[in-house]
Image: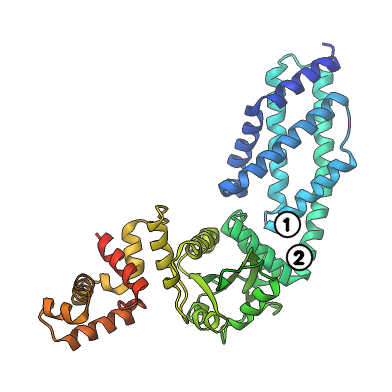
C-alpha cells in the first residue's frame, strides 16, 4: 500500500481542525484519565481547550509536512510549563495529559483514514514520539526553573498562590498541599479571607505595599505568618484586586480585623467558614458583600462576616447557601432548643419595635427583656439595636424552618 499524498494528509488535517468534536474528545479523555485535570474547576477548562486546539493543529501540521517543532513552539511550551509550576499542577500530570492527547489524535486520524498506509502510520508515530520527547525535555526544564524561582522569592510565590486560589486555578487540595510544601509553608486552616478597602467615594488602584502593611498589622500574636518567615510556617499572604486588598490569614485574625481596619478608616468583609478548596467562593462572597452592603452595615470596629455576606447574597437573588444554613449562620446558638426564650425575646423586640413594648408582650420586666437582648448580642455578635444587624436577625428568624 502506497502512502497518502500530501494533499490527502492535508485533507485529513483540515477535516480534524474544523471538527470541534476532536478537541472535545481530547479534553474529555484528559479529564477522565488524568486525576489532576478531573479536579479542575470550570474556569480552567477554556485554557485546557485552547491548548488542546493549538497542540492538535501543530501536530497535524508536522505530520502533513514531515516537520519538527520550531523555536516559537518551544517558547510556548516553556511558557505553559512555567504557568503550571506557578499554579501547582504537577509536571508529571501535564506530560501525561499530552500523551493522552496524542493517543486521541492517533485514533481520530485512523477513523478518518482507515486504510492508512504503513509509511503514513510510521510518519505519524515518528512525529508524535519526537514531539513528545522534545516537549517533555523543554517543559520539565522550564517547570523546574520556575519552581526554583518561586521558592526563592517566597513573598511573590505566596502572592501568586493566593492569586490562583482566588481565581480558582488550583487543581485539587492535594496539589495545593504539594505546592505549599515546596515553599516550606502551610496554608492557614482554618483561615480568614479578608477583603478590605478604604472608605470613601474615591477608591484608586490599591498599592501592594498597602495590602502588605495591613497584613503585618493583622499578624496574630503566637501564630507565625509574617511574609518572609522561613521554615514550615503557617503562611499569611496578601494581594490586591483593583481598589481592594485581599488577605489570607489564620482564622484567629478575624477577631482583630475590625479594630485594625477601623483605625485605618477601612471597611472589609472577613469570610471564615469556607474550606481551602473554596477560597474562590470566599472571595466572591466577600467582594459581592462589599459591593452591595448599605453604608449603615459598616460600623467602626466591625467587619462584615460570612453571615452578612450570605444575607446580602440572599437579598440579591444569588444565594450561595440554603436559607436554613443562612439562618444558622446569623442566629448561631439561638437555634438551640435551650435558647427558645431568647428567640421569643428577639421576635417580640423586632415585631414590637422597642424593648418596653416587647416586655409587655412577653409579660416581662423591661430590664429582663434588655438583659435577653444583651445575651442575644453576646451569643450572635449581633446587636438587635443596630439597624443593619437587626435586619439580618429579622431575615434569619423569618427564613428559619
Q: Residue at x 23, y 82 (%)?
A: 372
Question: Which quadrant: the C terminus?
Answer: bottom left
Q: Residue at x 68, y 68 (%)?
A: 158
Vertical comparison of 237 with 367: above or below? above
Question: Which quadrant: the N terminus?
Answer: top right
- Residue 40 placement (x, y as % from top left): 59, 49
Q: Are marks 2 and 1 in contact (CB under 8 Å)?
A: yes
Q: Nearer the viewer, residue 356 or 289?
A: 356
Residue on which disc 2 sits? 150
Is residue 190 something that shows in the picture?
no
Label whose residue precedes the other's in the sequence (2 or 1): 1
- Residue extending furthest toward the left: 363
Could you say which disc has been placed on residue 85 in the image? 1
- Residue 161 placement (x, y as % from top left): 66, 63
Q: Secondary structure at mark 1?
A: helix
- Residue 240 placement (x, y as % from top left): 65, 66
Amino acid at each position: 500500500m502506497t502512502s497518502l499524498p500530501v494533499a490527502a494528509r492535508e485533507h485529513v488535517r483540515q477535516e480534524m481542525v474544523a471538527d470541534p468534536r476532536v478537541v472535545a474528545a481530547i479534553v474529555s479523555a484528559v479529564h477522565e484519565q488524568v486525576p489532576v485535570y478531573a479536579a479542575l474547576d470550570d474556569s480552567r477548562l477554556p485554557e485546557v481547550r485552547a491548548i488542546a486546539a493549538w497542540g492538535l493543529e501543530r501536530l497535524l501540521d508536522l505530520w502533513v509536512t514531515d516537520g519538527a517543532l520550531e523555536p516559537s513552539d518551544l517558547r510556548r511550551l516553556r511558557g505553559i510549563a512555567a504557568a503550571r509550576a506557578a499554579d501547582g499542577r504537577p509536571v508529571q500530570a501535564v506530560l501525561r495529559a499530552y500523551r493522552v492527547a496524542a493517543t486521541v489524535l492517533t485514533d481520530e486520524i485512523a477513523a478518518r483514514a482507515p486504510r492508512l498506509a504503513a509509511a503514513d502510520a510510521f510518519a505519524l508515530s515518528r512525529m508524535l514520539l519526537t514531539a513528545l520527547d522534545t516537549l517533555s525535555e523543554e517543559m520539565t526544564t522550564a517547570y523546574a526553573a520556575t519552581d526554583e524561582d518561586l521558592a526563592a522569592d517566597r513573598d511573590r510565590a505566596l502572592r501568586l498562590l493566593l492569586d490562583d486560589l482566588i481565581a480558582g486555578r488550583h487543581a485539587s487540595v492535594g496539589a495545593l498541599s504539594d505546592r505549599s510544601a515546596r515553599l516550606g509553608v502551610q496554608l492557614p486552616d482554618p483561615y480568614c479571607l479578608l477583603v478590605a478597602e478604604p472608605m470613601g467615594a474615591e477608591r484608586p488602584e490599591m498599592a501592594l505595599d498597602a495590602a502588605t502593611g495591613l497584613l503585618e498589622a493583622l499578624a496574630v500574636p503566637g501564630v507565625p505568618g509574617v511574609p518572609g518567615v522561613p521554615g514550615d510556617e503557617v503562611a499569611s499572604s496578601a494581594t490586591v484586586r483593583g481598589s481592594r486588598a485581599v488577605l489570607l490569614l489564620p482564622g484567629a485574625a478575624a477577631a482583630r480585623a475590625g479594630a485594625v481596619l477601623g483605625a485605618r478608616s477601612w471597611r472589609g468583609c472577613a469570610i471564615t467558614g469556607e474550606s481551602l478548596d473554596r477560597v474562590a467562593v470566599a472571595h466572591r462572597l466577600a467582594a459581592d458583600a462589599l459591593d452591595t452592603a448599605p453604608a449603615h452595615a459598616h460600623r467602626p470596629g466591625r467587619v462584615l462576616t460570612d453571615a452578612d455576606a450570605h444575607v446580602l447574597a440572599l437579598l440579591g437573588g444569588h444565594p450561595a447557601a440554603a436559607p436554613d444554613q443562612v439562618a444558622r449562620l446569623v442566629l448561631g446558638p439561638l437555634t438551640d432548643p435551650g435558647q427558645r426564650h431568647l428567640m421569643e425575646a428577639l421576635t417580640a423586640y423586632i415585631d414590637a419595635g422597642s424593648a418596653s413594648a416587647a416586655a409587655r408582650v412577653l409579660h416581662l420586666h423591661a430590664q429582663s427583656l434588655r438583659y435577653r437582648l444583651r445575651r442575644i448580642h453576646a451569643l450572635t455578635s449581633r446587636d438587635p439595636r443596630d439597624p443593619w444587624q437587626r435586619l439580618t436577625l429579622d431575615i434569619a428568624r423569618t427564613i428559619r424552618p
